[in-house]
Amino acid sequence: MNKRGLGNVVATILIVLLVIIGVAILWRSIRPLISSAGNRVQPDCFTVELDITGCVYSSGGQSAVVSVRRGVGKGDVKAVKFVFSFASGDPLITSEVATNIDELETFTSPSIPGFAQAPQSVIVIPLVGEDKILCTQIDNPTLCTTGP
């Protein structure tokens, strides 16, 4: 019996087993990352179009009212958040404002209190789906005006 040929077979089997074990270890570490990232992506974020039609700051009540118009696009918007910017450079992100705004409808927020100074601009961020997934939107800020 030729022992030299048998050694090559054993070495090949060991290399194949090591490769299989390495792939299994890699798969166990990568799989949770892939599956959790897929759960957080909400397709409705790509189809929702929200535009701010007005932002009025009331200096007397130190509050603001924002009007939002929804464009065409399928999506289940459950709430919105507003991001106000100020001359000081510090942004203010509001808590979520519940809304069930449908396509081509306009929504006016209730009075948003808590402003020490007049906001310069505002952007809107939709929260979609039952889990209220926060959608990141590239939006041009809308200037706020001072009202009564």
Image: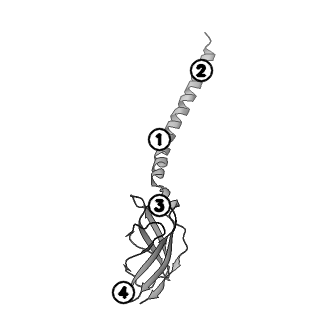
- Sequence-earlier tag: 2 or 4: 2
Which residue does the numbered mark 2 point to in the structure image? 9
- Cα separation, mark 2 vs mark 3, equals 59 Å
**Amino acid type of the residue tagged 1 in the rendering:** Arg
Is 27 rendered above or below residue 78?
above
Which residue does the numbered mark 3 point to in the structure image? 75
Mark 2, other Cα within 10 Å: few <14 / some 14–19 / many ≥20: few
> Which label lies toward us, 4 or 1?
4
Residues at discs 3 and 1 in contact (Cβ within 8 Å): no
**8 or 32: which is nearer to us?**
32
Mark 4, other Cα within 10 Å: few <14 / some 14–19 / many ≥20: few
Residues at discs 4 and 1 in contact (Cβ within 8 Å): no
Residues at discs 1 and 2 in contact (Cβ within 8 Å): no
- Cα separation, mark 1 vs mark 2, equals 29 Å
> Which label lies toward us, 2 or 4?
4
- Sequence-earlier tag: 3 or 1: 1
Residue 84 rendering spot, x and y as whole percentages: 46, 77
Image quadrant of residue 101? Answer: bottom left
- Sequence-earlier tag: 1 or 2: 2
Which residue does the numbered mark 4 point to in the structure image? 61
- Sequence-earlier tag: 2 or 3: 2
- Cα separation, mark 2 vs mark 4, equals 84 Å
- Sequence-earlier tag: 4 or 1: 1
**8 or 16: which is nearer to us?**
16
Q: Quadrant of the C terminus?
A: bottom left
Residues at discs 2 and 4 in contact (Cβ within 8 Å): no
Which residue does the numbered mark 1 point to in the structure image? 28
Residue 77 rendering spot, x and y as whole percentages: 43, 64
Helix, strand or loop under label 1: helix
Mark 3, other Cα within 10 Å: few <14 / some 14–19 / many ≥20: some
Residue 31 rendering spot, x and y as whole percentages: 48, 44
